[in-house]
Image (spheres, helix red, strand yellow):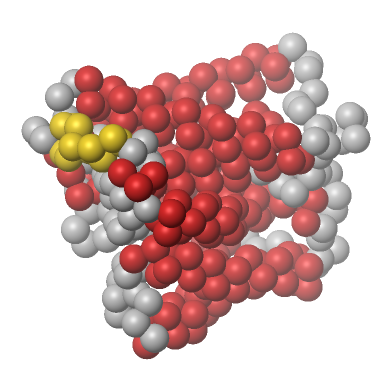
Amino acid sequence: MTQMIFSDEPAKGWIPPSIAAPFICIFLLVISMLPGDLGLAYLGFTEPMGPPRGPLGFFLMLVSFSALGLAISGWVRWVEKRSLASVGLCGEQRLKKFLTGLAVGIAMMGAIVTAIALSGGYRVADLAPAFASPAALGWIALLLAGFVVQASVEEFVFRGWLFSTIMRRWNITAAFILSSAAFTFVHFSPRATLLELVMTFIFAIFACAWVRYSNSIWGVMGWHVGWNWFGGTGFDVPITGLDTGLPALVVKLVPVGPAWLNGAGEGPEGSIYTLGLLTAASLGLLLITTRRGRNGIDPPDSEHQL
Protein backbone atom coordinates (compact mmCIF):
# COMPACT_ATOMS: atom_id res chain seq x y z
CA MET A 1 0.00 0.00 0.00
CA THR A 2 1.46 3.33 -1.09
CA GLN A 3 2.11 5.78 1.73
CA MET A 4 3.33 9.36 2.08
CA ILE A 5 5.67 11.05 4.51
CA PHE A 6 6.56 14.72 5.09
CA SER A 7 3.94 16.06 2.64
CA ASP A 8 0.93 14.92 0.60
CA GLU A 9 2.08 17.17 -2.24
CA PRO A 10 1.79 15.22 -5.52
CA ALA A 11 4.87 14.88 -7.69
CA LYS A 12 4.43 16.52 -11.10
CA GLY A 13 7.36 14.67 -12.62
CA TRP A 14 8.75 11.13 -12.69
CA ILE A 15 9.08 9.13 -9.47
CA PRO A 16 11.44 6.19 -10.10
CA PRO A 17 10.34 2.65 -9.21
CA SER A 18 11.29 1.72 -5.66
CA ILE A 19 13.77 -0.94 -6.71
CA ALA A 20 15.51 1.53 -9.05
CA ALA A 21 15.68 4.44 -6.60
CA PRO A 22 18.69 3.13 -4.58
CA PHE A 23 20.67 2.62 -7.79
CA ILE A 24 19.81 6.12 -8.98
CA CYS A 25 20.88 7.42 -5.56
CA ILE A 26 24.26 5.68 -5.80
CA PHE A 27 24.73 6.89 -9.40
CA LEU A 28 24.02 10.51 -8.46
CA LEU A 29 26.32 10.19 -5.47
CA VAL A 30 29.20 8.92 -7.60
CA ILE A 31 28.94 11.44 -10.44
CA SER A 32 28.50 14.41 -8.08
CA MET A 33 31.14 13.52 -5.48
CA LEU A 34 33.83 11.93 -7.63
CA PRO A 35 35.23 15.16 -9.13
CA GLY A 36 35.63 16.74 -5.69
CA ASP A 37 37.12 13.58 -4.22
CA LEU A 38 39.63 13.30 -7.06
CA GLY A 39 40.51 16.97 -6.74
CA LEU A 40 41.13 16.72 -3.00
CA ALA A 41 43.27 13.62 -3.54
CA TYR A 42 45.27 15.37 -6.28
CA LEU A 43 45.90 18.34 -3.98
CA GLY A 44 46.99 16.01 -1.19
CA PHE A 45 44.14 16.67 1.23
CA THR A 46 42.98 13.04 1.16
CA GLU A 47 44.52 9.69 0.42
CA PRO A 48 43.83 8.55 -3.18
CA MET A 49 40.21 7.36 -3.02
CA GLY A 50 40.70 7.05 0.71
CA PRO A 51 40.43 8.85 4.06
CA PRO A 52 41.10 12.57 4.57
CA ARG A 53 44.51 13.72 5.76
CA GLY A 54 44.15 15.62 9.00
CA PRO A 55 41.50 18.14 10.03
CA LEU A 56 41.78 20.21 6.83
CA GLY A 57 41.01 17.13 4.76
CA PHE A 58 37.95 16.49 6.91
CA PHE A 59 36.77 20.07 6.58
CA LEU A 60 37.21 20.13 2.81
CA MET A 61 34.98 17.06 2.44
CA LEU A 62 32.15 19.57 2.52
CA VAL A 63 33.01 20.35 -1.13
CA SER A 64 32.02 16.87 -2.30
CA PHE A 65 29.01 16.66 0.02
CA SER A 66 27.77 20.07 -1.13
CA ALA A 67 27.92 18.81 -4.71
CA LEU A 68 25.89 15.75 -3.71
CA GLY A 69 23.27 17.92 -1.99
CA LEU A 70 22.96 20.11 -5.09
CA ALA A 71 22.65 17.05 -7.35
CA ILE A 72 19.80 15.55 -5.30
CA SER A 73 18.10 18.95 -5.01
CA GLY A 74 18.25 19.27 -8.79
CA TRP A 75 16.79 15.79 -9.23
CA VAL A 76 13.90 16.60 -6.88
CA ARG A 77 13.24 19.95 -8.58
CA TRP A 78 13.60 19.05 -12.25
CA VAL A 79 12.97 15.29 -12.51
CA GLU A 80 10.45 14.50 -9.79
CA LYS A 81 9.19 18.11 -9.81
CA ARG A 82 8.33 18.40 -6.15
CA SER A 83 9.33 20.76 -3.36
CA LEU A 84 12.10 20.31 -0.80
CA ALA A 85 9.38 20.23 1.86
CA SER A 86 8.26 16.89 0.39
CA VAL A 87 11.72 15.42 1.10
CA GLY A 88 11.75 16.35 4.77
CA LEU A 89 12.79 20.02 4.88
CA CYS A 90 9.44 20.95 6.37
CA GLY A 91 7.72 21.89 9.60
CA GLU A 92 8.04 24.62 12.20
CA GLN A 93 10.79 25.43 14.75
CA ARG A 94 13.42 24.00 12.43
CA LEU A 95 16.44 25.42 14.24
CA LYS A 96 15.12 24.19 17.58
CA LYS A 97 14.66 20.68 16.18
CA PHE A 98 18.14 20.72 14.68
CA LEU A 99 19.76 21.89 17.92
CA THR A 100 17.76 19.37 19.96
CA GLY A 101 18.96 16.61 17.66
CA LEU A 102 22.51 17.93 17.96
CA ALA A 103 22.33 17.70 21.75
CA VAL A 104 20.86 14.18 21.63
CA GLY A 105 23.58 13.02 19.24
CA ILE A 106 26.31 14.37 21.52
CA ALA A 107 24.66 12.79 24.56
CA MET A 108 24.27 9.38 22.90
CA MET A 109 27.88 9.31 21.72
CA GLY A 110 29.04 10.39 25.18
CA ALA A 111 26.93 7.65 26.80
CA ILE A 112 28.40 4.97 24.56
CA VAL A 113 31.99 6.06 25.14
CA THR A 114 31.36 6.22 28.90
CA ALA A 115 29.85 2.72 28.89
CA ILE A 116 32.83 1.34 26.96
CA ALA A 117 35.28 3.01 29.36
CA LEU A 118 33.45 1.74 32.46
CA SER A 119 33.51 -1.77 30.96
CA GLY A 120 37.28 -1.63 30.57
CA GLY A 121 37.40 -0.95 26.85
CA TYR A 122 39.21 2.40 27.11
CA ARG A 123 42.10 3.65 29.21
CA VAL A 124 42.30 7.36 30.06
CA ALA A 125 45.57 8.84 28.73
CA ASP A 126 45.05 12.60 29.12
CA LEU A 127 42.40 15.13 30.09
CA ALA A 128 41.20 17.70 27.54
CA PRO A 129 44.54 18.08 25.69
CA ALA A 130 42.86 20.21 22.99
CA PHE A 131 42.63 23.14 25.41
CA ALA A 132 46.42 23.40 25.39
CA SER A 133 46.29 24.33 21.71
CA PRO A 134 44.23 27.29 20.43
CA ALA A 135 44.82 26.01 16.89
CA ALA A 136 43.28 22.65 17.78
CA LEU A 137 40.22 24.36 19.29
CA GLY A 138 39.86 26.36 16.09
CA TRP A 139 39.97 23.22 13.97
CA ILE A 140 37.44 21.52 16.24
CA ALA A 141 35.06 24.45 15.70
CA LEU A 142 35.62 24.32 11.93
CA LEU A 143 34.97 20.59 11.92
CA LEU A 144 31.61 21.22 13.53
CA ALA A 145 30.73 23.38 10.50
CA GLY A 146 32.10 20.69 8.18
CA PHE A 147 30.04 17.97 9.84
CA VAL A 148 26.95 20.18 9.59
CA VAL A 149 27.31 19.96 5.82
CA GLN A 150 28.40 16.31 5.63
CA ALA A 151 25.86 14.78 8.01
CA SER A 152 22.98 17.02 6.94
CA VAL A 153 23.50 16.13 3.28
CA GLU A 154 23.57 12.43 4.09
CA GLU A 155 20.25 12.73 5.94
CA PHE A 156 18.76 14.84 3.14
CA VAL A 157 19.77 12.22 0.57
CA PHE A 158 18.99 8.96 2.36
CA ARG A 159 16.28 9.78 4.93
CA GLY A 160 14.79 12.71 3.04
CA TRP A 161 14.76 12.04 -0.69
CA LEU A 162 15.38 8.27 -1.00
CA PHE A 163 13.13 7.31 1.94
CA SER A 164 10.21 9.44 0.73
CA THR A 165 10.63 8.37 -2.91
CA ILE A 166 10.44 4.67 -2.08
CA MET A 167 7.42 5.25 0.19
CA ARG A 168 5.56 7.01 -2.62
CA ARG A 169 6.04 4.06 -4.96
CA TRP A 170 5.82 1.20 -2.47
CA ASN A 171 5.39 1.30 1.33
CA ILE A 172 7.01 2.11 4.66
CA THR A 173 8.69 -1.28 5.09
CA ALA A 174 10.36 -1.08 1.69
CA ALA A 175 11.47 2.48 2.44
CA PHE A 176 13.16 1.38 5.68
CA ILE A 177 14.91 -1.61 4.13
CA LEU A 178 15.97 -0.24 0.73
CA SER A 179 17.17 3.18 1.95
CA SER A 180 19.11 1.55 4.79
CA ALA A 181 20.62 -1.02 2.43
CA ALA A 182 21.78 1.78 0.09
CA PHE A 183 23.27 3.70 3.04
CA THR A 184 25.13 0.57 4.16
CA PHE A 185 26.42 -0.10 0.65
CA VAL A 186 27.96 3.37 0.19
CA HIS A 187 29.68 3.02 3.59
CA PHE A 188 30.99 -0.47 2.79
CA SER A 189 34.68 -1.17 3.23
CA PRO A 190 36.45 -4.45 2.38
CA ARG A 191 37.98 -4.28 5.86
CA ALA A 192 34.60 -4.00 7.59
CA THR A 193 33.55 -6.75 9.97
CA LEU A 194 30.06 -8.21 10.07
CA LEU A 195 29.38 -6.29 13.30
CA GLU A 196 30.34 -3.00 11.62
CA LEU A 197 28.07 -3.67 8.62
CA VAL A 198 25.15 -4.59 10.86
CA MET A 199 25.77 -1.47 12.95
CA THR A 200 25.73 0.73 9.83
CA PHE A 201 22.40 -0.79 8.77
CA ILE A 202 20.92 -0.31 12.25
CA PHE A 203 22.26 3.27 12.27
CA ALA A 204 20.22 3.89 9.11
CA ILE A 205 17.15 2.15 10.54
CA PHE A 206 17.35 4.37 13.62
CA ALA A 207 17.54 7.51 11.45
CA CYS A 208 14.54 6.30 9.41
CA ALA A 209 12.60 5.65 12.63
CA TRP A 210 13.41 9.20 13.78
CA VAL A 211 12.13 10.85 10.60
CA ARG A 212 9.06 8.59 10.61
CA TYR A 213 8.33 9.73 14.16
CA SER A 214 9.06 13.43 13.65
CA ASN A 215 7.80 13.80 10.05
CA SER A 216 10.83 15.91 9.07
CA ILE A 217 14.60 15.51 8.79
CA TRP A 218 15.68 18.54 10.84
CA GLY A 219 16.08 16.65 14.11
CA VAL A 220 17.93 13.66 12.66
CA MET A 221 20.25 15.99 10.74
CA GLY A 222 21.25 17.61 14.03
CA TRP A 223 21.61 14.21 15.70
CA HIS A 224 23.92 12.94 12.95
CA VAL A 225 26.04 16.11 13.19
CA GLY A 226 26.40 15.83 16.98
CA TRP A 227 27.15 12.11 16.77
CA ASN A 228 29.91 12.49 14.17
CA TRP A 229 31.44 15.67 15.57
CA PHE A 230 31.62 14.61 19.22
CA GLY A 231 32.74 11.11 18.30
CA GLY A 232 35.50 12.49 16.09
CA THR A 233 36.77 15.29 18.33
CA GLY A 234 35.85 14.45 21.91
CA PHE A 235 38.08 11.48 22.69
CA ASP A 236 40.88 11.13 20.09
CA VAL A 237 39.35 7.92 18.75
CA PRO A 238 38.27 7.22 15.15
CA ILE A 239 34.80 8.05 13.88
CA THR A 240 33.56 5.56 11.27
CA GLY A 241 37.14 4.34 11.02
CA LEU A 242 38.55 7.82 10.27
CA ASP A 243 40.95 9.81 12.43
CA THR A 244 40.57 13.60 12.56
CA GLY A 245 44.17 14.01 13.68
CA LEU A 246 43.19 16.37 16.52
CA PRO A 247 43.80 16.18 20.29
CA ALA A 248 40.80 15.22 22.38
CA LEU A 249 38.36 17.93 23.41
CA VAL A 250 37.18 16.02 26.51
CA VAL A 251 39.55 13.15 27.31
CA LYS A 252 42.11 11.19 25.32
CA LEU A 253 41.18 7.51 25.40
CA VAL A 254 43.28 4.51 24.38
CA PRO A 255 41.44 1.33 23.32
CA VAL A 256 42.17 -1.78 25.39
CA GLY A 257 40.53 -5.18 25.28
CA PRO A 258 38.44 -6.81 22.54
CA ALA A 259 37.37 -5.03 19.36
CA TRP A 260 33.71 -5.92 19.88
CA LEU A 261 33.79 -3.80 23.04
CA ASN A 262 35.68 -0.67 21.94
CA GLY A 263 35.33 -0.89 18.16
CA ALA A 264 39.12 -0.89 17.65
CA GLY A 265 39.98 0.96 14.41
CA GLU A 266 36.33 1.69 13.70
CA GLY A 267 35.95 3.71 16.90
CA PRO A 268 32.98 3.56 19.28
CA GLU A 269 30.61 3.03 16.34
CA GLY A 270 32.05 -0.48 16.06
CA SER A 271 31.19 -1.35 19.66
CA ILE A 272 28.46 -3.77 20.68
CA TYR A 273 27.17 -0.96 22.91
CA THR A 274 26.41 1.18 19.85
CA LEU A 275 24.53 -1.66 18.22
CA GLY A 276 22.51 -2.22 21.39
CA LEU A 277 21.69 1.45 21.96
CA LEU A 278 20.64 2.17 18.36
CA THR A 279 18.55 -1.02 18.22
CA ALA A 280 16.73 -0.11 21.44
CA ALA A 281 16.22 3.49 20.32
CA SER A 282 14.88 2.35 16.93
CA LEU A 283 12.38 -0.03 18.53
CA GLY A 284 11.30 2.67 20.97
CA LEU A 285 10.65 5.22 18.23
CA LEU A 286 8.79 2.68 16.08
CA LEU A 287 6.63 1.64 19.04
CA ILE A 288 5.74 5.24 19.88
CA THR A 289 4.91 6.01 16.25
CA THR A 290 2.76 2.89 15.91
CA ARG A 291 0.81 3.65 19.08
CA ARG A 292 0.30 7.24 17.99
CA GLY A 293 -1.10 6.05 14.67
CA ARG A 294 -3.48 3.61 16.35
CA ASN A 295 -4.77 6.40 18.56
CA GLY A 296 -5.37 8.61 15.53
CA ILE A 297 -2.84 11.25 16.61
CA ASP A 298 -1.22 13.26 13.84
CA PRO A 299 2.59 13.16 13.71
CA PRO A 300 4.49 16.35 14.54
CA ASP A 301 4.26 18.96 11.78
CA SER A 302 1.71 16.94 9.81
CA GLU A 303 -0.23 18.66 7.08
CA HIS A 304 -3.07 19.15 9.56
CA GLN A 305 -0.80 21.19 11.81
CA LEU A 306 0.89 23.39 9.20
Asked whether 104 or 284 is in front, the reply is 104
Compared across the picture, whether 215 is left or right of 63 comes to right
Q: Is residue 185 above or below residue 213?
A: below
Compared across the picture, whether 270 is left or right of 224 comes to left
Quadrant in which residue 95 is drawn: top right
Rendering coords of residue 201 (x, y %): 39, 43
Quadrant in which residue 37 is drawn: bottom left
Extreme top residue here? 295
Q: Is residue 292 above or below residue 165?
A: above
Rendering coords of residue 234 (x, y %): 37, 41
Rendering coords of residue 19 (x, y %): 53, 58
Quadrant in which residue 13 is drawn: bottom right
Extreme bottom residue here? 42
Q: Residue sitting at 34 percent across and 75 percent down?
A: 46
The quarter of the image holding the N terminus is top right
Q: Residue sitting at 50 percent across and 35 percent down?
A: 105
Compared across the picture, whether 137 is left or right of 94 comes to left
Q: Is residue 41 above or below residue 207?
A: below
Q: Is residue 263 above or below residue 81?
A: above
Q: Residue sitting at 71 percent across and 20 percent down?
A: 293
Residue 227 seen from this side? yes
Q: Residue sitting at 43 percent across and 41 percent down?
A: 230
Rendering coords of residue 297 (x, y %): 78, 17
